[in-house]
Image (tube, grey):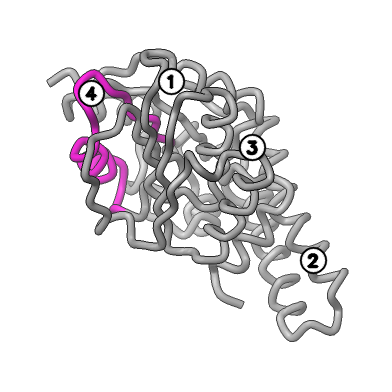
Amino acid sequence: MDRQTISRLAHAHHPIAAPIADESVARLLSRATAHTEAGRALDLGCGEGGWLVRALAARPSWRAVGVDLDAAALTRARETATALGLERRLGLHHLDAREFKAVEPFDLVLNVGATHAFGGLLPALAAAREHLAPGGAVLVGEGFWEREPDRAALEGLGVARDEYADLATTTDRVIADGWTPVYGYVSSPQEWDDYEFCWTGSLAAWALDHPDHPDAAAAREAADRHRAEWLHGYRGTFGFVTYLLRRSR
C-alpha cells in the first residue's frame, strides 16, 4: 500500500492533516483572512482541501487554489467543495508544489504540516514568499521539540535530532528569515492524542472492514507500527506550532 493511500485512509475522520482541532483551525483561518474581505488563498500541499474549504465557507468573497501530488485527495477536495457549493471558487492543481507558478500573487499562502515537500520550514517559507502579495500573510505549521528527544522519539519519527529545534529556536529562525509572527498556535496534548488515535484508528478500522482486500494486512501493520512509534516514542516530546506570519523585510 503506497504512502498516499495510507494517509488518505488514516485521515478519514480527521481531514486536517495536522494535530489541530476544528475550532482551532477556524480561529487560525479567521485571523489569517481578516485583513481583506475579498482575497485569494493558496495551499501548497492542500491534500483533501480541508483548510481551503473551511476558508471559503467562512469567507464568501474569497477564492482559493490548492496544489498537491495526490490525485485521489484532490478528487475528494473537489467533491467536498461541490457538495458545499464552493467549487466555482476553488481551483485545484495536480502538481508538485515546488513547480507551481501563479499568474497573480495571493493574500494568504498556507503550508501546514507539509513543509517536508520543500525540504523544511525555511525553504517552505521561501516558496511561500514567491507567491505572496504585498501585505499578505502566511499560515505555516511545523514540528518542534517540546523536550530533548531520546532515541525512541527519534526512531519513532524517523528523523535526526537537528531536523527540528525547540519552540524558541524555531521562532528565532523564522524571525531571522525576515518574518514577523502576528499570531501562533501550539497544538495541545489533547489535540495530538485525538489526531494520532484518529490516524491509527481509521486505518485499522478500514483493515478490519475490508479483511479480504489485498492491502488489509499492510494497512493493519502500518496502523500498529505508527501507534507504537507514537506511544512508545515521540508522545510528549514532539510538538506542533502553527504560525501566522507577515513579511518584515
- Judged from the image, the secondary structure of the residue bearing numbered disc 4 is strand
Label 4 environment density (alpha carbons within 10 Å; few <14, some 14–19, many ≥20): many
CA–CA distance in space, label 3 to label 1: 25 Å
Tag 1, which secondary structure?
A: loop
Three-letter code, disc 3: Trp
The image shows residue 175, relative to residue 123, as above or below, that is above
- Mark 4 sits on what residue? 179
Choose the circle earlier in sequence order: 4 or 1.
1
Q: Amino acid at mark 4?
A: Trp
Is 8 positioned to the left or the right of 119 in the image? right
Q: Nearer the viewer, mark 3 or mark 1?
A: 1
Magenta-drawn stretch contains 225? no
| Mark 1 lies on residue | 33
Answer left or right for 149 relative to 109: right
| Three-letter code, disc 1 | Thr
Where disc 3 sits, the SS reads helix
Q: Counting other residues with Cα less than 10 Å from the Cα at mark 3, is it few (<14), some (14-19), or many (20 or more)?
A: many
In the picture of the structure, the residue carrying the numbered disc 3 is 192
Which residue is denoted by mark 2 in the rendering? 206
